[in-house]
Amino acid sequence: MSPHPNPIRVGVAGVGVMGRNHARVLSEMREVELVGVFDPDADTARTVAGQFEAKAATTVEDFIALGLEAAVIATPNRTHADLGVALIEAGAHVLVEKPIAATVVDAERLIAAARAHDRVLMVGQVERFNPAVEAVKRAIADENVISIQITRVGPFPPRMGEVGVVIDLAVHDIDIIRHLTGSEIAEVQPQLARTKADREDTALLQFRLENGVIAHITTNWVTPYKTRTLQVATQNKFVVADLMTRQVTEYFGQQPDGSYSTRGVMSWPNEPLKKELEAFAHAIRTGETPAVTGEDGLRNLEVALRCLGGVA
């Protein structure tokens, strides 16, 4: 990391798979200094801290005592609100991994704390920063969108603890749908099933947005291979994106014989997590509204909970 004259002192709370990724990217960023990591598991905290030349904390108090200007929260969902509020009250800007919190009340607590203390609260909806999603948004910018279909399937992830596919996976796609349409989800029609897990591991979710767009998400943990595809139908185009290979194709100009013209849409080879963390740093430095706000996180959570048949 090349030094910045005035780097943002940042820490990472929770250094499992996602938290380690955050620590890795932050340690490579010029505009921030990774000063510490927090994990209640002392071995994990020490190992990751040692890897990135940061201090290890095993309690929230010790983590806050590092004098952080900003923190990334990648701990279990149920801990997001208490930890986030404590960090905000201590003066830190916060990026909280999706979903923003476990309940609507908790999400509202986080949003209120950030507002009261004038701190940046950003939600880690990393697919917003996927170059393929950005390319699709550009491709449909002046189009009348009719429907969106997203498939996000794969095998059961061994790391999953407390949530099913709707909270773990579909929250990504709920955010993509809101982001691409600039509209809120008005109606939800969920179909959920349990195949192998004690929580829903298969979900077929249908939505109607306030602007009339219809959308469909297929997500599960029972497919032996990973697929991440996004398809958008507009009045004049059909745009297909593979969110893993970042390949985006546009079909347009249907002929009387049913054939289409096609063209590839350029998507840049950026790491989405790096773009997300750069956007967080930008919001801290400029005071601009973050790319994914606490309210965005709350809306995404509300829709996910409606799909699960409850509000919290």
Image (cartoon, rainbow, N blue to C red):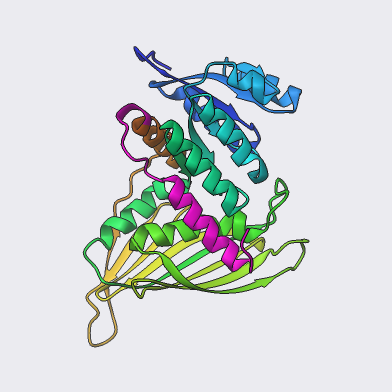
Q: Residue at x 66, y 25 (%)?
A: 60
Q: Which one is nearer the viewer's eye here, 6 or 268?
A: 6
Q: Is residue 286 magenta?
A: yes
The percent position of residue 218, horizontal first and vertical second, equals 55, 68
Q: Which residue occupies the extreme bottom position in the image? A: 256
User: How many circles with numbers are drawn on the protein?
Assistant: 0
The percent position of residue 8, horizontal first and vertical second, equals 42, 20
Q: Is residue 209 above or below residue 170?
A: below
Q: Which residue occupies the extreme front position in the image? A: 116
Relative side of 46 to 68, left or right? right
Residue 83: image quadrant is top right
Query: Magenta segment, which residues?
Result: 284-312
The percent position of residue 293, horizontal first and vertical second, equals 42, 45
Q: Residue at x 68, y 54 (%)?
A: 163
Q: Is residue 58 above or below residue 5?
A: below
Q: Quadrant of the C terminus?
A: bottom right
Q: Which one is nearer the viewer's eye here, 311 or 17?
A: 311
Residue 137: image quadrant is bottom left
Q: Residue at x 73, y 61 (%)?
A: 199
Q: Is residue 157 visible?
A: yes
Relative side of 254 to 25, left or right? left
Q: Is residue 50 visible?
A: no
Q: Is residue 304 above or below residue 296?
A: below
Q: Quadrant of the N terminus?
A: top left
Q: Which one is nearer the viewer's eye here, 127 or 222?
A: 127
The percent position of residue 144, horizontal first and vertical second, equals 26, 71
